[in-house]
Amino acid sequence: MAVVGRAALILALITSLFGIGASLYGARQGRRDWIDAGRRSVYALVAILTVAIAVLEIAFISNDFAYNTVANNSSLTTPLVYRAAAMWGSQEGSLLLWVWLLSIWSSLAVFLTRNRLREVVPYAVAVLLGFGTFFTSLLVFFATPFATTAPAPLNGVGLDPLLRNPAMIIHPPMLYSGYTFFTIPFAFAVGALITRRVDAEWIGVARRFALASWLFLGIGVLLGARWAYYEIGWGGYWGWDPVENAALMPWLISTAFLHSIMIQEKRGMLKIWNASLVLGASTLAIFGTFLVRSGVLQSIHAFGASTLGVPFVSLIALMTGGSIYLVVSRRDVLRSEHRLDSLFSREAAFMLNNIVLVGLCFVIFWGTIFPLISEAVTGTTASVGPPWFDRYTVPLALVLVLLSGIGPVIPWRRATLANARRNFALPLGLALAMLIASYTVVPISSSAPTVILFCCVAFVFGSIGQEFWRGWRVRRATSSDSPATALVSMVRRNQRRYGGYIVHLGIATLFIGVAASATFQHTHYVNLSRGQSDTVGGFTFTNERPTAAIVDDPSGTGALLTLGVYLRVSRDGRYVTTEHPTAEYYPDASGAEGPVGSLIGGDAVSELALDSTWRRDISAAINAVPLQASLQTEINYANSSVTAKALAGNPTLPYILLAIIAHNYLQHPPPAPLKLASSPLVMWLWLGALIVLFGGIVAIWPPPGAVRGRVRARYLARVAREVGRA
Amino acid sequence: MTEVLGVLLIAVLLALVVWFVGAPLRRPSAATERPSDARRALEAAKEAKYSEIRDAELDYRTGKLSDEDFRAIDRQLRAEAVEILHALDELR
Amino acid sequence: MNPARKRQVRLIVSLTLALALGGGLIYTSFSAADPALSPTQLLAKARPGVSYELTGTVVAGSVRHLGDGVLDFRLADRAGGGPSVPVSYSGAVPDPFRVGRELIVTVNKSGEGFVGQPNSMITKCPSKYVAAPNPKST
């Protein structure tokens, strides 16, 4: 069946190439039939790639180790759900997932524009299939997932235990959906520029696709942060690691685009800027995809050096060069219709927002590729760490949060003192109240940036709240809706606006969590013997007793031995909770650690014990490697007891000896090497993320057709009256 | 046996793809057709203009536009909407 | 000042500001960065009192867990062979730490050996993207 997979990939490549040719030919000759054939190629691509991915998934689920990919990433003891997810744990599998998702989203885009932008769509289809061609070529020529070995090995290496986490199931597909979705605004921007159709119709389409990519990528990034929070080796939800930065950069640029496109819609300004942002965001998305899998930068996430560097760099160069050429050669259609009237206007606020976002992106970009630059300039690879990133991103982030409160209420064209008083009085008042609170009731005054942030957040809540209040009052005055219905109908009639406001609230909430937890967290690394205690951030952790489970696999990830410790947590003498961090040990297929040692000689995984409330997170984790090391003497002794003769007589002897070691651990536990931490307000981060997500969905949801019809009719009547008068 | 099945599957897939993608090319209807985008572009512009008129009114009512600014903008937007409607009429 | 001139001035001011800030950023990054060295480079260049990011592979047989949570091991170049650097490290050890794994640790020269800064060790996810020989069947 591997031959089916391989043939499917070749067929996909041929179909993509055909689609490009058909679309371009149809566009040049004005032939609908060839254009339609091009569009159908996109749909066909979905079917073909689904066949290919199905073949691979079936191989994984059925443990067909003849496939090299399956043998390298899965094993007989890997649980079913992680076997399925292991498919995208490898370079070639993840590429296949990437191009499959690309074909799905491309089909969606082609379907949604089947009756619109008739001049632009063929070129957009050609660009999308161009990406398809690129990735299927990689799969066919460089990194095939369907290579097999005969005779098939009896077992695989297994999925890296660090990846045996529910997040592995959803984070890569979500993140790849985000990355692949960015190709759509790119394709339509290229198509629009080629055909010089950069008008209202294109703006509407581009905006919606950009919003969808923004939303998907944002979810991917947040899922990654949540996963990183649980994984001990990552040390928190954000570490300025290259792969984290790689996903954040296109997201920042598309946030800038979503704002500045409003200026283009209202005032016909910033057309070159907007086109550049769209093209830039997508190029950064491809750049991010390249960074993560090229091994060019040191990262915890590094997938190792690969042969894909050159093709990716060529693609990025082509995208960058092509974009610059298109924007420069089409600058006549991208001329601004108006100019900026005043620095105190919504246009100016949005422009400042754009500058800050692009500035943030630049800082992050520079810091991420700095190792390459320093190598080129000084000959030594040097890298900048989180303190450097924080130093420059924190002030920019503060400005951004403040702007998110100013933008919604500042008038267009020019703000006067009178309406400034009207619009900013309440938000400023709340900010002032928060300032006073920071020095009285809220214990954050030791950190000036945190105080500033909290005041900015109060400002944002004030201005957004004011907007909702005023809009609601207008709705109540102009309709007979009940209070609750008025709120809903107000939002439904202006989903873009109020969805955006909700996103701002979400970002502000998120930053509360970030600021508090980053500034005021306490972490201790201690060894606690049974009965010993340690106090972290006011919470006292006491080692009550050890736990051991063998073969039982409480977390369902295939671990053979799970050691843990019960920690009693109290505060000021009052009981808070009991935490149970564990260390899981997996088998090592190579047998290098001896008959007993190999049972637990594979990678260790430490499972975080977390207690979350709205006020704080307290967590405990076992340092798995030193804990295993403390058992080494017994393991060595057990290894020497397993002679060939003994093993022949009793094949389960190693397991029995391991059970004895586990039992000894329970009777005489060594001091537990622990990482104990308490962080305030972490939950607000996740809450803010959910609010952002909700706001994005509100903004992108298709408005109710009935409303559109009614509104359209009413305005048609009024405008018709004008025509009559004219 | 699975090899034969595999080859059969590939053949079926290939046939389906060729049939599906080539369907438009087998249509006997007129091949050349300049897409009538002008109407679509105007319709989109009209929708966008209506949205802007509504937005401006909401901005005015929530205090983001002064009286005279709103009147000026409203008048201008409606005039632009009228132009678009004229253009649409001419197309018909 | 007429509007056109005002806009010109604004543009020039903002561009100058952007260039100045960008330049400042770029300049400070060179002094704020930790040089990342391989074991060979470290042995050649290391001076006491300076922190280095040492990147290398854990040498087989060199790992010793001493009392008090101190971990002794040696790191060699990724390519294999060549000299190895002894590191004495205390603090959190990331889960993927094993013989043959690549890791990054911040070290300071101390006498003939190197002391790792506490909790500065990062191990890399084991690379599955390099062509690996098929595992022997058990």
Image (tube, coloured by chain):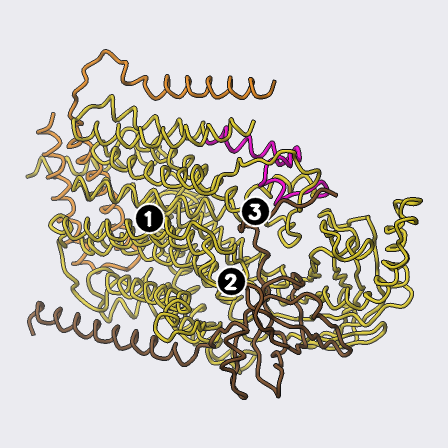
Q: Secondary structure at mark 1?
A: helix
Which residue is identified by label 3?
A89
Rendered shade, chain A: yellow
Q: Position of residue B31 (x, y in %)?
A: 19, 18
Residue kind at label 2, given as amino acid type: Ser
Numbered badge on residue A299? 2
Visible in this render: residue A472?
Answer: no
- Secondary structure under badge 3? helix
Along the polypeptide, which appears first: circle 2 or circle 1? 2
Q: Which chain is orange?
A: B
Give me the chain that's brown.
Answer: C
- The residue under label 1 is A315
Task: Point out the stretch of residues depicted in magenta.
Answer: A49-77
Crowd tier of the residue under label 3, counting other residues whose Cα lies within 10 Å: few below 14, some 14–19, many 20 or above:
many
Q: Mark 1 Cα within 10 Å, few/some/many (few <14, many 20+)? A: some
For residue A649, side relative to residue A555 (left or right): right
Residue A377 rendering spot, x and y as whole percentages: 34, 73
Tell me the CA gap for discs 3 and 1: 24 Å
Image quadrant occupied by the C terminus of chain A: top left
